[in-house]
Structure formats: C-alpha cells, structure tokens
Image (spheres, rainbow, N blue to C red):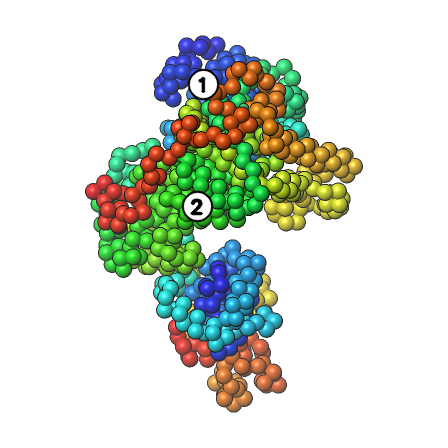
C-alpha cells in the first residue's frame, strides 16, 4: 500500500471510511466492513494485503493530505478536485487489475507457490538434474508438489509445461508476458525478484505487485479451464466458498427452510450471529442465490420504501424507520438488496 | 575405533575432498576417540563438515542445537542437495502434526536441527531421550556464554538437557571465542575436560580497512564509489532494513551493478531468488542486515563493507568472515562517520531490558504479545525460578558488558596501530607482527590503492543476460528446448 494505491479506493463525490478500506485490505469479514466494501466496489480486494499496518495506512493518508489530494475529517477521506484529476491520471496510466475477484474463491497465493515450484521441478527434470535448491515454500506446498510430481512425472511434463507457458505468454500483451516470464524459476535461472522486475519496468513496487497478483489470478482462471490434467491438478483443493465456512453452514440451513431460531439453537449460536452470517452471505453472493423475500416481506419493503424513497442509498439512516416494526439487520438487508439491484458488478 | 584412514576415505567418497581444512581432522580425531570437543573454527572453515562426516561414518543420529531458526531449513536443504535426504529441522514454524510425525520417526533421520527452546519442551525431550544420539552438536556455542554478545538464556538449559539425554558425545562449535568465553562455554555445559581445538581467527587474506567521514553524504558517495570500482561479488552490511533497502536502490541506480537487499522482511520467494542469484554469480552486491544470517556458503566474496559500526568485535569478525573463503585476496572496509557509535549503542542497549522494564515484566504473567522478545526473556528467568533481584543484577552487568563490547569495537575503529594486531589481542591469539601479510591494514597503509591488491573490477560487472531476455528465450532455456 502506498499513497497512489490508496487513491484508487477514494471518491471525489463522497467521503469514504478509511477503516473500511483498511479492513477490506487486511481481510476482516465483519458485516459492516463487507457492506461498505461492497458500496465502494472494493470487495475483490478483500484480504489483498493481510499484513497492512495502521502505520503504513496512516502514512499513505498523510502523504495524500500533504499533496492536497484529499481532505480528511475524523477517519473519513474524500478526494479534492486536484485529487480527482490525479485519480483519473492514475486510472489511465497505471496497471488496472481485472481478475482480482477470483481471489475470493481460489487461494491464488498457494496456487502460485505450487505452480512456481512445479515449474522449477519440471525445468530441472528437463536437464536431468536432481541436485538443486528447491524454492522454499510451506511444508504443505512442498508435499503437494512432491505428490503431484510422483503422479505425473512420466507424462512428458517438459513439453506440457513448455506449451502451457507458451500459450499463456502468447495470449498476454508482450510487456506482461515478459514481466511474468522473468519471475519464473528453473534450471540455472534463479528468477528475478519482484523488486528487480519493477525497477526494469519503471513501476513502483506496489504497482508491480498488483500486476503480479492480477496475472496470477488470470493464470488461475486459465488453469481451472485447462484441459491438461497435470496442470489442472495444481489447483486441487484450493477452491473456497465466497462466504466463510461457518456462515455458509448457516446459509444452507436457512435456504433449506429452517427458521433463524432453530438454526441458532441447533448450532449453539447467538441469534445475532446467525443474522450476521446471513448478511455476510447476502453481501457476498449474487442476488439470486439469497432468499431476500423470506426476511423482507413485500409489506415490510413497501413500508420502508415509503420512508426512504428519494434518499440516496448511502444517506439512509436507520432512525428514519426505527419506529416501524423492523430490526436494524433487516434494514441493512434492504440496503444490500438495493445496492445489488443498482449495480451487479460489486 | 575409527581410523584416520577411514576419515580420509569418507572425506573423499562423500565430499570429494582429498584434504581436511585446518582443525577438521583434529576435531574428528578427538570425537572418534569419544572426547567431548570444543572447536573454535573461523566462519567458513567447515564446521559443518565435522559433524556431517562424523554422522556419515558412524551412521548415528546427529542432533544439532542451533539458535539460527531462520537458517535451519537452509541447512537441511543444503544437506538434501548434497544427497542426504534423512535430515530435518524441528522448528516452531511447523504444524503440530508435522512435528509429531518427525518425533515418532526419529530413528529414520541422520541429522536433526533444533532450537534450544524446542529441545527443552517435555514432549520433544522425552522423544530424544528414548533414542540413541550419536553426537550432540551445540552450534554457535558462544550463545551459551553470558560473556558473549549473542547470549541466549535458553542455552543455559543445555547443560541439564545434555544429562537428561544420557550425556551423549558432544561437539561445541563456534566461530569466534575469547579465552574467557571458551571457559564459560565449557563450564555452562558442564564439560570442563572437553578437548579444545582452536584455529587462529585471523584471516590473512582479508585486508582490513577503516575509513572516516564527517558527513553522511560523503559516506554514501564513497560507498557508491567503492561498489563501482571494487571487484565483485560483495556484501554491504547495514544495521537497519530500511537503510539496506534504500542503499540497494541507490547502488542499483548509480552503478552498473546488479544489487539486491537481503533481510528478515523478505518473503521466502524473494529470499530464495536473491540467495540463488548470488550463489550463481548473477548478482554483484547484496545489501544485508547484520541481524540476518545468510544460509549460503559462497567462496568468492571479494569485499565486505560495513556501512554502520557493529556493536561488538565478534559480530564484526563473523560478518567479514564471509569474504575470501577461497583464500584469495579480499577486503573488509568499515565506513565510519563520527557519531555512528551512538546508533550502535542504541541498538545494542535496546536488546537488553532496562530496570523499569524488568520490574514491569516481572509483575506480569506469561507474555501477552507473541514476539515480545523482552517479555519472553524475563518470563524465561521467572519460569526458571530466578528472583527479580537476581535478574536485575544479571541484566545490569549485561548492560555494562554491552557498553564494554562496543567500546572494544570502537577501539578497533580508532586505533592508529595495526588493526590485525588489535583483533589478535582481542581473541587472545597474539602473533608476531612478522607474520602479518604484506598488505595488512589501513593503519599501515592508509591510502592503499586497491589495485595493488588486485581488487579493482576489471570489466563491467558480470551482468546476467536474464534481464534482457524475452519470454520465448526464457522458456527455451527453462525447459531445455
Ligand atoms: Zn596491520
């Protein structure tokens, strides 16, 4: 995270909550973080920078402030006019990620570790070399790749990998292909570090990292569609659900028709937790995969809308409707529904 | 009884060498005669060969206690690459099930690396108690000495642990130790009779140089100049990660060299790449922090430059020991700017808890924050039955020792007399001045032209063609097409 990257997440038309932006990047799945992350179109960045510290975040804010690009009130920031101009320049002149969303359903970090190590193993095999330093990865990744190699080593991996990478690079813009090829590790080729590549491509390290992650996401998508079983096998077990495991369990019971009270009793969860699970699911899943009507009856929606129509979504206040027979979580669910109907691209 | 001939045979067959380096055969002979041994061999003199060969020849389990957790995995990999697959590191980074698996299969291993903290855990200790240990190695043994700069209290348990392991044959290994530290090591491990193998710490092929600066910009300029003109590869040490990063950028921008920073903050992919580029001569210069060791053994490092003053002579000597392991002429240059000792003093002092901190932590229960080193340190003493007064006393004297250690380091920087003599005196190994190499140190030859030493870069740096290659060429090379 640097000041430039922070600008990406801010808006010139309304103040945004810095804590939400930070929590999304760190990967906190609280309902309020996810809700505002959805409103800011930032959900695909969930957990993008797990080690982001408050100090780094504050520094980025401070830098933008000093340059007159944002105004900050308490912990909300808004782009100034000049900031908006800079943001436009940034969007035009720097790398724009397009595939980050796949991170929400695939552990791309582990996938890349596996693919990188597999590439090295196959490269060394192509030279019949058995004495080399393998990439240092987690124990799990090492074991997986070992098993993988045992299973496929007779399958002419040399050609398979050569063709695979060739197809990948041929389809990429040439600078991106060159960027990524230099990260690969193999026989007598330790590979370049991200910092070295970013230096040669005259990018900041933050931007280079974004390009790397986005390219890996693209690769993960490609590999999931790959016909070749050896390449495909590198993704095994790396899928996860859009919703956290516990929330997913709640969701399944809910969609099977169980009442919230029953779910709460059966799973020994507080009722408030069950509700949070459902809100998380509603935020993360496509509109049609959540049964809104069971919680928001048409009458309730009509009642609420008579009060709220005419106000922009982000200005809705619970106190506008609190005298009605409605809980805050139902109000929030209506907000989610509205947001999704307004734009599906979250 | 293993004969000298057998030792030579194994050396040849397994390691491909026909001769031992100084000290190795002596240590092996002592060990095969079942003498506990304290070996003081300079960095890069092949300490590891001693226990590797002993393990290979006796086919017994070698248990290596090491403080360098970040290096253990590298050490295992190095053994793997040499063909020894039955090696493992037991570290806190492992999952519970991995650790258990290894503990249940100890008999399948020849080499196990472990930290003293891990070894003192009941479950771990009892697993080792019921297995036959052929050789216990206490690596970096100076860590056990309260007189040593890297003192680690967990090492104090080792004397006791060794008894619990039924007093296995023990090798204590260290790169640099004064007489006082050597006595302390033997006493703390309760092995006063151990055989000592002491090799001279002096490295005759390293020219010792100190340069002084008034302003930081002058020092930076000089660093750029040195890196540009000296024969590569080289290592530059810094006392902060931030400075190492900054200077790596500056050097990359201002010289033709391929430069990378190397410190504990790097992710494992980057660490691997930097290490391997350096090993394969695709990197000219590494900007490293002293706190972070390097799990690589590179013989042809031509210079080690210190941008900051280390906090003691031991660290300095250990770090410059990376230069010239091939015996060829090399140089160690310390760039000193007036006031640098305050940074060193601060960093050195920071590692030892202050009076009020000790008091505070003594009131606390188990450390609240993972990685709070001071809390862990005090907790260790508290757990092992020390009173606050005892701890206060011991840290007070430790602080004094750190001050003295830095003063000794500054003595090296400032002495107008021979730097080599100074080091020899420090390590109680004074030799006749007549044995000094022809070109010895900056006190003798202040304005020495590095050309005289043959240390000027002759051609442009050995840039790899990696960076310029396009992806089709990279793929062809990777998959041998
Ligand atoms: Zn001298």
Q: Along the line of sight, which residue is nearer the eye, B210 or B60? A: B210
Residue B60 in view here: no
Residue A95 in view here: yes
Quick check: B9 left or right of B200? Answer: left
Q: Are the residues at dot 1 and dot 2 in contact (C-beta closer than 8 Å)?
A: no
Residue at the location (26% across, 54% down)?
A169
Which image quadrant is residue B409 in? top right
Residue B80: where, in percent of width, then height?
40, 31
Q: Along the line of sight, which residue is nearer the eye, A48 or B164? A: A48
Residue hosting label 1: B21
Residue B92: where, in percent of width, then height?
54, 40
In front: label 1 or label 2: 2
* Viewport quadrant of the C terminus of chain B: top left
Residue at the location (46% across, 11% down)?
B2
Which image quadrant is residue B138 in? top right
Residue at the location (65% across, 17% down)?
B192
Which element is circle 2 on? helix
**A159 shown above or below B111:** below
Which element is circle 1 on? loop
Task: Residue at the far right: name it.
Answer: B389
**B226 shown above or below A109:** above
Residue A85: where, in percent of width, then height?
43, 73
The tag earlier along the polypeptide, 1 or 2, is 1
- Within 10 angstroms of label 2, few (less than 14), some, or many (20 or more) residues? many
Quick check: B178 left or right of B465? Answer: right
Residue hosting label 2: B251
Total marks in image: 2
Report how far apart the C-alphas of labels 1 and 2 lie in the structure.
Answer: 36 Å
Name the quarter showing ligand 1. Answer: top right
Residue at the location (66% across, 33% down)?
B407
Residue A164: where, in percent of width, then height?
25, 51
């Amino acid at each position: 995270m640097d000041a430039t990257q922070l600008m990406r997440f801010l808006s010139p038309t309304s103040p945004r909550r810095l804590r939400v932006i930070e929590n999304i990047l760190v990967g906190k799945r609280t309902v309020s973080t996810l809700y505002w992350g959805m409103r800011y179109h930032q959900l695909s960045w969930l957990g993008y920078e797990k080690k982001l510290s408050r100090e780094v975040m504050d520094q980025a804010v401070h830098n933008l402030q000093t340059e007159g690009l944002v105004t900050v009130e308490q912990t909300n920031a808004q782009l100034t006019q000049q900031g908006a101009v800079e943001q436009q320049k940034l969007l035009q002149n720097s790398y724009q990620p397009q595939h980050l969303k796949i991170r929400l359903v695939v552990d791309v970090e582990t996938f890349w570790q596996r693919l990188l190590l597999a590439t090295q193993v196959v490269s060394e095999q192509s030279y019949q070399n058995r004495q080399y330093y393998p990439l240092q990865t987690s124990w799990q990744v090492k074991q997986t790749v070992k098993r993988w190699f045992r299973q496929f080593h007779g399958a002419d991996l040399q050609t398979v990998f050569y063709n695979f990478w060739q197809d990948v690079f041929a389809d990429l813009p040439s600078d991106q292909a060159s960027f990524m090829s230099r990260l690969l590790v193999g026989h007598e080729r330790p590979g370049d570090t991200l910092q070295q590549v970013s230096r040669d491509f005259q990018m900041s390290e933050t931007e280079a990292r974004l390009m790397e992650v986005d390219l890996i996401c693209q690769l993960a998508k490609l590999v999931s569609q790959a016909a070749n079983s050896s390449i495909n096998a590198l993704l095994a077990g790396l899928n996860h659900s859009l919703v956290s495991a516990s929330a997913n369990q709640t969701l399944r019971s809910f969609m099977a028709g169980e009442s919230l009270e029953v779910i709460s009793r059966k799973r020994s969860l507080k009722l408030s937790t069950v509700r949070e699970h459902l809100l998380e699911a509603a935020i993360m899943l496509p509109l049609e995969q959540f049964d809104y009507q069971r919680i928001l009856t048409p009458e309730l929606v009509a009642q609420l809308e008579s009060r709220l129509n005419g106000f922009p979504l982000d200005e809705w206040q619970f106190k506008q409707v609190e005298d009605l027979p409605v809980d805050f979580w139902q109000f929030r669910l209506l907000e989610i529904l509205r947001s999704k109907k307004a734009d599906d691209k979250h | 009884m293993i004969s000298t001939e057998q030792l030579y045979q194994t050396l040849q067959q397994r390691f491909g060498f026909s001769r031992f380096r100084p000290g190795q055969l002596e240590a092996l002979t002592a060990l095969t005669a079942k003498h506990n041994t304290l070996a003081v061999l300079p960095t890069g003199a092949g300490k590891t060969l001693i226990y590797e060969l002993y393990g290979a020849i006796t086919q017994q389990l070698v248990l290596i206690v090491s403080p360098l957790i970040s290096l253990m995995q590298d050490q295992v990999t190095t053994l793997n690459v040499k063909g020894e697959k039955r090696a493992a590191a037991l570290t806190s980074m492992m999952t519970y099930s991995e650790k258990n698996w290894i503990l249940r299969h100890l008999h399948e291993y020849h080499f196990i690396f472990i930290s003293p903290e891990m070894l003192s855990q009941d479950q771990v200790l009892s697993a080792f108690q019921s297995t036959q240990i052929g050789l216990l190695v206490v690596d970096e043994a100076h860590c056990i000495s309260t007189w040593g700069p890297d003192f680690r209290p967990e090492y104090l348990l080792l004397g006791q642990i060794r008894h619990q392991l039924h007093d296995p044959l023990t090798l204590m290994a260290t790169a640099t130790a004064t007489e006082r530290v050597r006595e302390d090591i033997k006493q703390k491990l309760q092995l006063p009779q151990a055989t000592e193998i002491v090799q001279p710490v002096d490295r005759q092929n390293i020219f010792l140089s100190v340069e002084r600066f008034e302003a930081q910009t002058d020092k930076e300029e000089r660093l750029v100049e040195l890196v540009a003109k000296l024969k590569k590869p080289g290592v530059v040490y810094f006392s902060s990660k931030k400075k190492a990063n900054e200077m790596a950028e500056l050097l990359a921008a201002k010289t033709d060299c391929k430069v990378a920073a190397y410190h504990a903050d790097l992710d494992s992919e980057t660490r691997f790449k930097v290490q391997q580029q350096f090993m394969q001569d695709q990197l000219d210069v590494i900007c490293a922090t002293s706190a972070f060791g390097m799990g690589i053994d590179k013989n042809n490092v031509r210079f080690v430059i210190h941008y900051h003053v280390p906090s003691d002579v031991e660290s300095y000597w250990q770090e410059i020991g990376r230069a010239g392991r091939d015996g060829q002429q090399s140089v160690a240059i310390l760039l000193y700017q007036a006031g640098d000792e305050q940074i060193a003093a601060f960093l050195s002092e920071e590692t030892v808890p202050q009076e009020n901190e000790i008091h505070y932590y003594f009131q606390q229960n188990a450390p609240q924050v993972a990685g709070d080193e001071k809390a862990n340190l005090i907790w260790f003493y508290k757990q092992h039955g020390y009173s606050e007064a005892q701890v206060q006393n011991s840290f007070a004297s430790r602080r004094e020792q750190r001050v003295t250690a830095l003063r000794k380091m500054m003595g090296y920087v400032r002495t107008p007399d021979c730097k080599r003599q100074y080091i020899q005196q420090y390590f109680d190994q004074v030799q006749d001045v007549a044995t000094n190499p022809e070109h010895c140190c900056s006190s003798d030859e202040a304005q020495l032209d590095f050309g005289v030493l043959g240390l000027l870069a002759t051609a442009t740096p050995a840039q790899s063609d990696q960076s310029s290659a396009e992806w089709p060429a990279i793929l062809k090379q990777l998959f041998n097409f």
